[in-house]
Image (cartoon, helix red, strand yellow):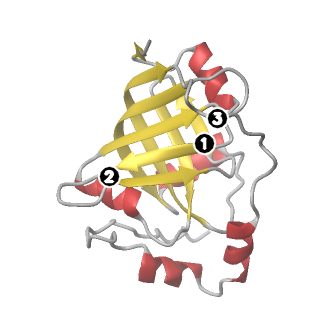
Amino acid sequence: MAKFYHRLDEKLRDFIAKQHMFFTATAAEGSRINLSPKGLDAFRILDDNTVAYLDWTGSGNETAAHIRADGRLTIMMCSFEGAPNILRLYGRGEVAPKGSEAYRRIIADAFGGAEPEAARQVILLHLDSAQTSCGFGVPVYDYVRERPSLANWAAGEDDLPGYRRRHNTVSIDGIPSGHVEVEEPAE
């Protein structure tokens, strides 16, 4: 049976810590529903009601556009190893643009200061509720490793900020993503 929670307790935190993959789902009025798989050790719990993930540069920026237009964000994790379980996190999304104070703070506090070259922004989810369900229909898979493809692509891209300006400023439905890169402060 499904069970709802209003914060991330220790059991949910333990489940999250074991997952190698998660999915984000967003939509805005008149848009396609976006469902994206994520990995790359990008997910962090900030407190009992806030999670964040480091969003790498991609071919589009649907999640940010939908958050800007609508605000709703759902993150789902399902266990592919061990006991079956599905966890959905429901709430309001927020985008911390690359270079912003919020972005720098999260990178420092939650990611130990490690910022991959392909990092684009941090997506936060302010949790309204969490729901677990059985996951009995999810197959069992063995985790092998992360794919290096995205990091390799980013390392070979001459102008990542230019790529993001060309490909990440509007969704596939033309919704502005609000993508900006805050200039690093002069030292």
Residue 153 disc label: none
Q: Which residue is identified by label 3? A: 139
Furthest residue toward bottom: 158
Q: Position of residue 81 (x, y in %)?
A: 72, 31
Q: Establish if 31 lies above or below 80.
A: below
Residue 32 versus residue 130 in the image, above or below: below
As drawn, the residue found furthest toward the right would be: 144
Q: Work out how far the residue at label 2 is from the one at label 3, CA to CA, in angstroms.
A: 31 Å
Numbered disc 3: secondary structure: loop
* Residue type of the residue flagged with mark 1: Phe
| Residue tagged 2 | 67
Q: Nearer the viewer, residue 74 or 54?
A: 74
Q: Which is more N-terminal, label 1 or label 2?
A: 1
Give the number of the mark in front: 2 or 3: 3
Tell which of 164 and 39 is nearer to you: 39
Q: Are marks 2 and 3 in contact (CB under 8 Å)?
A: no
Question: What amino acid is labelled 3 in the image?
Answer: Pro
Q: Position of residue 63 (x, y in %)?
A: 39, 56
Compare residues 85 and 50 and report the one nearer the observer: 85
Could you tell me which quadrant the N terminus lies in?
top left
Q: Where is residue 26 drawn, in percent x and y?
A: 35, 49
Q: Give the left or right position of residue 48, taking residue 32 as reference.
A: right
Residue in the image at 44% along x and 78% along y: 167
